[in-house]
């Protein structure tokens, strides 16, 4: 007799990325000279987790009775306002934004999927995507569809986006689009103004056919070449054509992956719609995780609101970003010289190397002690965890594995 419902009987035991990371760590402990480019955390050149000390100070300052208490279901007002200001301070869109706290960016994605799509409907995203997008959709009894990410010139394929968006609207009468930018996971590609102009035009033409929601996953945004708000400024023109959402996370921006502090922010110019969205998201929170991490939200709210503390956090983050940028620069020099095929990459935790048989190439690399993540048609490379001194060996291994 099987007690699990049929759709849950064949679930994998572990996320494949975390499984590869576990194997890489075990090999390293046994003495193998391992390069671990799998999991998305920023490590220093000694392999230690990069941590922003001023954030830790803020966490330690939270009174025990505050950290131990229930937080409001939607999140503390100071935290929610801090997140909105972090994204939109000084912009008129901040006046019609609403937000709800979530356990990390993943919680924000979950709420978007279940609030803006009906069961069995499909989420639309780029052909290369963070694999948990599919997991989140599947677990919520939704599906995932993709459009071709890159055209023949290596730019975002706007034409295929328009075709696939039209197909989704024809099939289900509404659309939810996930765009992971800047510093896309897994490719490292950041949408530029030309890409955004194309997206805005496509969504504008399609908006009359049904409600369209566009979610910007900005988890890695603080490691982009440009300032965060400048990277998505063109997208704000969508606010009068579509529902614009932001999946905001403290995991990468504040190097607090385990704190599980995030938020979903929605832009709603109409006050009535804004109230309904806020109510729906708060209700969804109560029906899933109920409350988020009180101590974490209190500390992050302080970091966002205290000018002196915020300045210290920004300064520390800038130093870690410089470390990552040096790796990106080294990668671009060596990977270009080696003839590797990969997207435009000027910042962020990851890039990808195009490869016809990614599982075979990844297996070959593991034999050499080089761990990367195979995705459809490419190998994801997490430079966030690779010391600069190891990039030459990494590139050489990739060259041989992808050009047998």
Image (cartoon, rainbow, N blue to C red):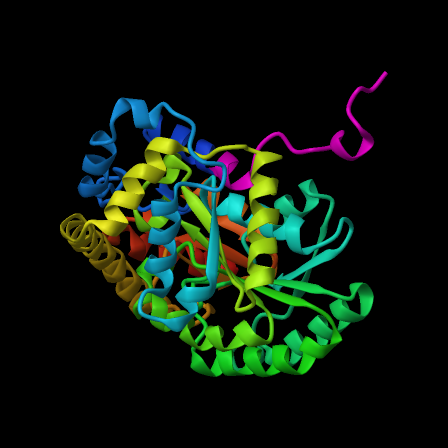
Vertical placement of 162 versus 246: above or below?
Answer: below
Q: Does residue 175 appear left or right of residue 364 in this picture?
A: right
Between residue 389 and residue 65, name the one nearer to us. 65
Q: How many marks?
A: 0
Vertical placement of 243 versus 199: above or below?
Answer: above
Q: Residue at x 62, y 77 (%)?
A: 203
**Does the rendering let one see residue 147?**
yes
State the image coordinates of residue 149 (x, y, percent, origin top left).
58, 70
Q: Residue at x 35, y 48 (%)?
A: 252
Say if the magenta span includes residue 197: no
Most extreme residue toward the right, as rendered? 1
Q: Does residue 201 appear left or right of residue 326 in this picture?
A: right
Q: Does residue 299 appear left or right of residue 9 in this picture?
A: left
What is the chief secondary structure element of the magenta stretch?
A: loop
**Does the rendering let one see residue 337?**
no
* Residues shaded magenta: 1-20
State the image coordinates of residue 119 (x, y, percent, origin top left).
76, 48
Most extreme residue toward the front, as rendered? 272
Vertical placement of 112 versus 193: above or below?
Answer: above
Q: Residue at x 58, y 48 (%)?
A: 279
Between residue 51 and residue 104, name the one nearer to us. 104
Identify the image quadrant of the N terminus: top right
Between residue 10 and residue 111, name the one nearer to us. 111
State the image coordinates of residue 87 (x, y, percent, origin top left).
37, 61
Most extreme residue toward the top, as rendered? 1
State the image coordinates of residue 287 (x, y, percent, origin top left).
62, 35
Q: Quadrant of residue 324?
A: bottom left
């Amino acid at each position: 007799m099987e007690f699990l419902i049929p759709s849950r009987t064949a679930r994998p035991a572990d996320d494949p990325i975390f499984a590869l990371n576990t194997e890489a760590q075990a090999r390293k402990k046994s003495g193998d000279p391992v390069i671990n480019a799998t999991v998305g955390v920023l490590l220093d050149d000694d392999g230690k987790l990069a941590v922003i000390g001023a954030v830790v100070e803020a966490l330690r300052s939270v009174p025990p009775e505050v950290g131990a208490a229930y937080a409001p279901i939607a999140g503390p007002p100071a935290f929610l306002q801090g997140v909105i200001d972090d994204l939109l301070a000084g912009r008129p869109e901040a006046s019609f934004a609403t937000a709800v706290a979530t356990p990390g960016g993943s919680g924000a994605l979950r709420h978007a999927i279940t609030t803006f799509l009906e069961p069995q409907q499909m989420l639309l995203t780029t052909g290369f995507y963070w694999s948990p997008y599919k997991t989140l959709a599947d677990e919520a009894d939704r599906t995932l569809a993709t459009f071709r990410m890159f055209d023949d010139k290596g730019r975002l394929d706007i034409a295929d986006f328009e075709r696939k968006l039209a197909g989704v609207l024809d099939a289900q009468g509404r659309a939810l689009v996930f765009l992971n930018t800047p510093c896309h996971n897994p490719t490292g590609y950041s949408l530029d103004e030309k890409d955004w102009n194309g997206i805005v035009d496509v969504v504008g033409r399609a908006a009359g056919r049904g409600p369209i929601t566009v979610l910007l996953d900005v988890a890695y945004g603080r490691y982009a070449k440009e300032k965060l708000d400048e990277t998505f400024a063109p997208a704000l023109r969508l606010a009068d054509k579509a529902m614009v959402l932001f999946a905001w996370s403290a995991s990468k921006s504040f190097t607090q992956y385990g704190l599980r502090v995030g938020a979903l922010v929605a832009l709603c110019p109409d006050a009535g719609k804004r109230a309904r969205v806020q109510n729906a998201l708060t209700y969804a929170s109560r029906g899933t995780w109920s409350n988020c991490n009180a101590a974490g939200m209190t500390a992050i709210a302080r970091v966002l609101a205290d000018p002196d503390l915020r300045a210290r956090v920004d300064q520390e983050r800038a130093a870690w970003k410089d470390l990552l940028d040096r790796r990106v620069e080294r990668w671009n020099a060596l990977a270009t010289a080696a003839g590797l095929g990969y997207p435009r990459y000027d910042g962020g935790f990851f890039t990808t190397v195009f490869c016809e048989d990614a599982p075979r190439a990844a297996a070959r690399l593991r034999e050499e002690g080089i761990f990367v993540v195979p995705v459809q048609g490419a190998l994801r490379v997490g430079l966030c965890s690779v010391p600069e001194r190891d990039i030459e060996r990494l590139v050489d291994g990739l060259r041989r594995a992808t050009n047998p």
